[in-house]
Amino acid sequence: MSNTESTAVVTAIASGEAHAAASSLVTQLRRGLSGREPAFVLIFASTAQPLSEVMPIVADAFSADRVLGASTSGEFTEATVAKSSVSAIAVAGPFALHAGLGRGLKASPERAVADAVHELPREVEGLPHRTAILLLDPLAGVSEEATLLAAAALGDDAPIPLAGGAAGDDLAMTRTWVACGTEVASDAVVVATIHSRHRLGIGVHHGHVALSDPLSVTKAEGATVHEIDGRPAWEVWAQRTRASAAERGVDPDTLGDEDIGAYLLRYEAGLASGGAMKIRAPLSRGVDGSLGFACGIAQGSVIRITESEPSRQIGSAREAARRAREALDRPAAGAIVFDCICRNLILGDAFDTAVRGMSEELGDVPLAGFETYGEIALDVGDMSGFHNTTTVVLALPS
Amino acid sequence: MLHDDAHPPVALEELVGVIGASVGDEKAREVLLEAARGLGLDPRAMTRQEALALLESLAHTPGIIGVSSRFGRSRLLLKWARDNLRAFR
C-alpha cells in the first residue's frame, strides 16, 4: 500500500451455478482493478450460490484474509438489482482490513464477539482512521447485543464507527451465513476493522411511520415476543395490520408459512426513542402465535406497528447516501450498502430507482450491497447500533 | 474525575436516552425508575456516581437490558471524562 495511491472501487454481479458465478466475479473484479490488488473484497451471496462454495474461489483469487461475505435476500450494484445472484465489491487504495469470525452467537454473544475481535490491531501505521464492519446471523436473536458488544470491545476508550448488515436467506428465515476468508458459519458474527488514510462516512435513514397505537409487550423472553396486550403476538399483529394489508389484496389470516416472513417485514415494530422510532423486525411466527425478532425485546416494552409507502423508501435511501457523503472529508469513490429487505418488498420494481438515487447522491460512484434482515450503524456518540427497515450507506473516500 | 459538586445533577431522563435507544424509552424509564427506587436514589437529581451506579445495577440483567446498560455506562463515563478534559483545556 502506497501512502499516495488513490482509491479504486470495482463492483461485480453474477448469477447461475455457484462455481461459475464466483469465477465470473473474480474475472470482473480483476478486470476492473487493472492489475491492482484489493485491500478488501466483500461478497454478498444469495442461497442459490452458497457462500461455502463461493468463498473458497474468491479467497483463492485474492488474499483470503481480505475477503468477507454474507448470505442475502437480494443483491445489487449501482448498475444491476437482482435476486438469486451474488454481488461483490473490491476496494484498492490506502486501506487495510483485518477481520475475525466468532461462533456460537446465540449461546454467548459476548464470547462470539470476543473471539472475532481478539486479534484485530488497534493501529496501522500511516492509516489513522478506523471503521468497523459487522456481518452477523440475525436468526441468533442477539443482533443489537452483538453490535453493542462489538462497539465496546473495539473502542470503549476510543470509540469507532460501525456499519454492517444482518445476513439473509431469501426470506426462508431458516439459516443465514457469514464468512471471513474461507471460514463460513451460521450462528456467527464477523467483525472487521478498516484502517484508512481518510475517514469513511456512514449514513442511515428509514422511512417508516406508526400504523398502530401503542401496544404493550406483556410476555417476552429474549428475542421472542409471546404476548402483546395479553394476547398472542401474531393475533394482535394480524388484527392491527389487516386493513392496511387488504389495500394490497393480502389477508393475513390466509398466509402460508412461506409468506409470513415477507408479511412481517412489511409491518415492523417501532420502539419510541428520543422523539424518533427505532424499528425492530419480526422475522418469524411460532406455532404458539409468538413472534421471533432479530434482537432482544424486553418484556414491558411499548411498541407501535409501523408501515411505509414507496415514495418514503426512495427518499430515505437518498437521505442515507447524502448523510454518508457529508460525513466524508473528500468526494466519495464508492459505497457499500446494507439495505433492509423490507424496502425491496415495499418498492418492488421501483427498488432500482432507490439504488440509482444512492449512487447519484454519492456522485455517480460504484456501489454494491445486499438486502438484509437488519442493518448496523453506530457512530461514535450513538447508544444503539442495530436497525431495521433502514438503508445504511458506508461511503468510501476517494 | 466525577467530583459531584463540580457537575450539574443527572436526571433520570438523561439515562432513558442512554438505554432507551436499544429498548425503547418507555421500558427504559420503567427499569431505571425501579432500580433507582431500589437504590434509594432521587430520579430527578442524581450525582454522576449515582447515575453510574444505577446503570451498573442493571448491567447484570440478562439480555438486552443488561447489555445496553453496560454499553451506556461505559460510553457515559467516557463522555463525562472527555467533557472534564475539555473543561481543563
Image: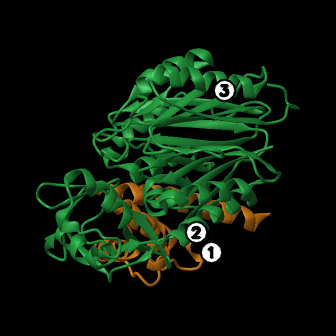
Chain colours: A green, B orange
Residue type at mark 2? Answer: His
Do tag 1 and tag 3 residues touch (Cβ < 8 Å)? Answer: no
In-front residue for pair B2/A294: A294
Instruction: Give coordinates of residue A88: x percent, y percent.
Output: 59, 34
For residue A4, side relative to residue A187 (left or right): right
Instruction: Give coordinates of residue B41: x percent, y percent.
Output: 37, 77
Residue shown at the point (55%, 54%) measured from the top left:
A377
Instruction: Give coordinates of residue A257: x percent, y percent.
Output: 20, 52
Residue behind mark 2: B3
Residue type at mark 1? Answer: Ala
Question: Subunit of mark 1?
Answer: B
Using a 10 Å C-alpha cutoff, classify the residue at mark 2 as few (fewer than 14 neighbours), some (14 to 19) or many (20 or more): few
Residue type at mark 3? Answer: Gln
Which of the two discs, 1 and 3, sits closer to the camera?
3
Do tag 3 and tag 2 residues touch (Cβ < 8 Å)? Answer: no
Q: Which mark is residue A28?
A: 3
Which of the two discs, 3 and 2, sits closer to the camera?
3
Residue shown at the point (33%, 36%) measured from the top left:
A187
* In the rendered image, the vertical position of residue A311 relative to residue A42, given as above or below: below
Question: Subunit of mark 2?
Answer: B
Q: Is residue A181 visible?
A: no
Question: Subunit of mark 3?
Answer: A
In-front residue for pair B72/A205: A205
Residue behind mark 1: B6
* In the rendered image, the vertical position of residue A328 relative to residue A236, given as above or below: above
